[in-house]
Amino acid sequence: MKFKIFLLSILMALVMVVLLKFPGSPTAYAQQPTVSVPTVTGTPPGPMATVYSNLPQVTVLSGPGPNFPAIGILVQNQTVPAYGTTYGGDWVQIGYPGVEGGKGWVYHSFVSVDKNLPLVTPPATPTQRVTPTLDPTLAARFVSEVTPTQLATFTAPPPVVIPTFEVSDSILTGGNVPVGFLIIGLAVVGIFGTFLSFLRGR
């Protein structure tokens, strides 16, 4: 039994030698590349902008300014690529997939940037597509004309004249007769009239 195993081992060794020696036989070696293989190295990331943690969300605009329409939002602590900034650094251009051009703008006070950003030429300020006009005929229906009326004039009343009466001494004295004499005379006439009435009563 051991002899059969020994013969089988020698036979297998001879077969391997034949396969390795003759050309055209299958090789047992792995194929070696004929060109240089580039080494895969990591590309350092570019500038990144991160939303501050105290802001729940930040509006992304299509341009650097409030006149541009909003195209989306960034949430708290979200990090996106930053491509540039406007002159003065008020607005930051960021990567925002899903919109035309794949870019948007956020206000610089809402995000922190880890590297210096180059200046980017901002797009032109959008113009209003429809200029609002006022129909004069329609506006005239809601405008009521108030006819001016003359205010009442105030005429000051004439001054009040208080009449005054002057009592002359001649009325009180009866001319040149003293007042005392008149009183005595009237008293005498009264007494005399009373006496006559008493006599008629009897």
Image (spheres, rainbow, N blue to C red):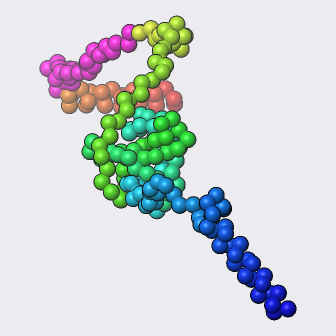
- Image check: 185 left or right of 191? left
Give the residue at the far bottom of this rendering. 2
Residue 172 sits inside the magenta stretch: yes
- The residue depicted at 53 percent of the width and 61 percent of the height is 32
Of 186 and 112, the residue lying toward us: 112
The answer to whether residue 107 shows anywhere in this view is: no
Of 18 and 43, the residue lying toward us: 18
- The residue depicted at 20 percent of the width and 28 percent of the height is 179
Residue 171 x %, y %: 21, 20
Where on the picture, by quarter, is residue 64?
top left
- The residue depicted at 46 percent of the width and 60 percent of the height is 40
Magenta stretch mostly in which secondary structure? loop
Residue 132 x %, y %: 48, 18
Q: Quadrant of the N terminus?
A: bottom right
Write down the region rendered in magenta: 150-178
Q: Is residue 112 above or below residue 10?
A: above
Give the residue at the far left of this rendering. 176
The answer to whether residue 153 shows anywhere in this view is: yes
- Image check: 35 left or right of 187? right
Residue 91 x %, y %: 36, 45
Residue 133 x %, y %: 47, 15
Please count the marks in the image: 0
- Image check: 174 left or right of 38? left
- The residue depicted at 33 percent of the width and 45 percent of the height is 85
Q: Is residue 135 above or below residue 177?
A: above
Give the residue at the far right of this rendering. 1
